[in-house]
Amino acid sequence: MTTTTNNNAIDAARVELLLSELRLPSMRLRWATLAEQSDKEGWPAARFLATLIEHEVADRSCRRMERHLAEARLPAGKTLATFDFEAVPMVSKAQVMALASGDAWLEKGANILLFGPPGGGKSHLSAALGLALVENGWRVLFTRTTDLVQQLQVARRELALENAITKLDRYDLLILDDLAYVTKDQAETSVLFELIAARYERRSMLITANQPFGEWGKIFPDQAMTLAAIDRLVHHSTILEMNVESYRRREAIDRKRGRGKPPAFATRNKLEKAKTD
Ligand code: ADP
Ligand code: MG
């Protein structure tokens, strides 16, 4: 009896040691409880082993998702569930939900272009899409366009631009928020073009901008490069136009009027008309 107990204790110590050597923290944490249950209920060895490994796999995928969520740097609290699609009737909820799975477009490096005036929900919708994609196993980076351009400019000065762009390949999707806010001195270098050209047909981008193309001449060094950039971006792309009044402003106005949900711009005109008719 004493010998058995001793042997058990030695086995237990070996298991602990080996599992930590193999870096299997979840199995290390759970094996003892599970072994006890398995002994008590007379499980076949294969069932015990499979159940134990399943825990490691599940926890690992949980940890991976947490890592991907942290690296994505998504603005907090912007989800598809809290996005009011009725406020943007020109954007189809079904289409956005299909995009949120990522399968059809991220695999071939296609893009999304989101246009609309300030406050219309571009950042919210792109962050929400980003979050859904991370939850579906994709890797995403959300960044203000000027921040990323600045980083790439620094890399370029250090002769490490190519390396920096290659590092971004790890992300299935780059969300560049507010393209229009790229400053003049940033536009004089071609780092943004280099990024777009490098990702073309390989890795996806989601770009938000106030203006569809009209003002893009200010973002690239010259007209030829502007056209080349637009050409690559739109070649495989979904364009969503969110031509609505500022959501915040509408919310404020609607609160004042004691109404519930803010209607879309077009609907509002109809409502106003109905009132004055
Ligand atoms: P944009 O990036 O187009 O300037 P934002 O996404 O920053 O606009 O939206 C401004 C604010 O209004 C944010 O707090 C956002 O969460 C909210 N908002 C905008 N559109 C919607 C919407 N359709 N449903 C819910 N919240 C919205
Ligand atoms: Mg925004």
Image (spheres, grey):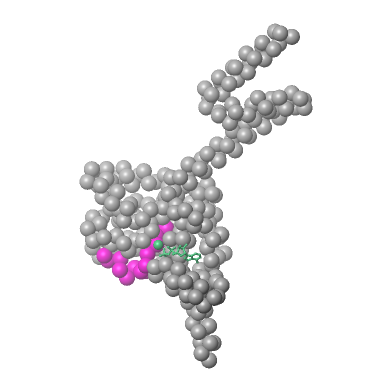
Residue 224 in the image: state x and y as whole percent.
Answer: 26, 63
Q: From where the camera sits, is residue 102 visible? A: no
Query: Along the horizontal axis of the image, is 180 left or right of 206?
Result: left
Name the residue located 62 percent from the left edge and 34 percent from the top edge: 55
Residue at the farthest bottom position: 277
Looking at the rendering, the stretch of residues picked out in magenta corresponds to 205-218
Name the residue located 30 percent from the left edge and 53 percent from the top edge: 149
Query: Along the horizontal axis of the image, is 201 left or right of 86?
Result: left
**Is 208 a magenta residue?**
yes
The answer to which of 222 and 263 lies nearer the viewer is 263
Q: From where the camera sits, is residue 184 visible? A: yes
Residue 71 in the image: state x and y as whole percent.
Answer: 43, 45
| Quarter containing the N terminus | top right
The answer to which of 254 and 80 lies nearer the viewer is 254
Residue at the farthest right position: 41
The answer to which of 105 and 14 lies nearer the viewer is 14
Residue 253 in the image: state x and y as whole percent.
Answer: 47, 75
Name the residue located 49 percent from the left edge and 71 percent from the top edge: 251
Query: Along the horizontal axis of the image, is 67 left or right of 46?
Result: left
Query: Along the horizontal axis of the image, is 159 left or right of 142?
Result: left
The relative height of residue 216 versus residue 204 in the rendered view (above or below) is below
**Is 233 a magenta residue?**
no
Name the residue located 71 percent from the left edge and 24 percent from the top edge: 36
The relative height of residue 88 versus residue 175 in the rendered view (above or below) is below
The answer to which of 188 and 2 lies nearer the viewer is 2
Residue 269 in the image: state x and y as whole percent.
Answer: 49, 82
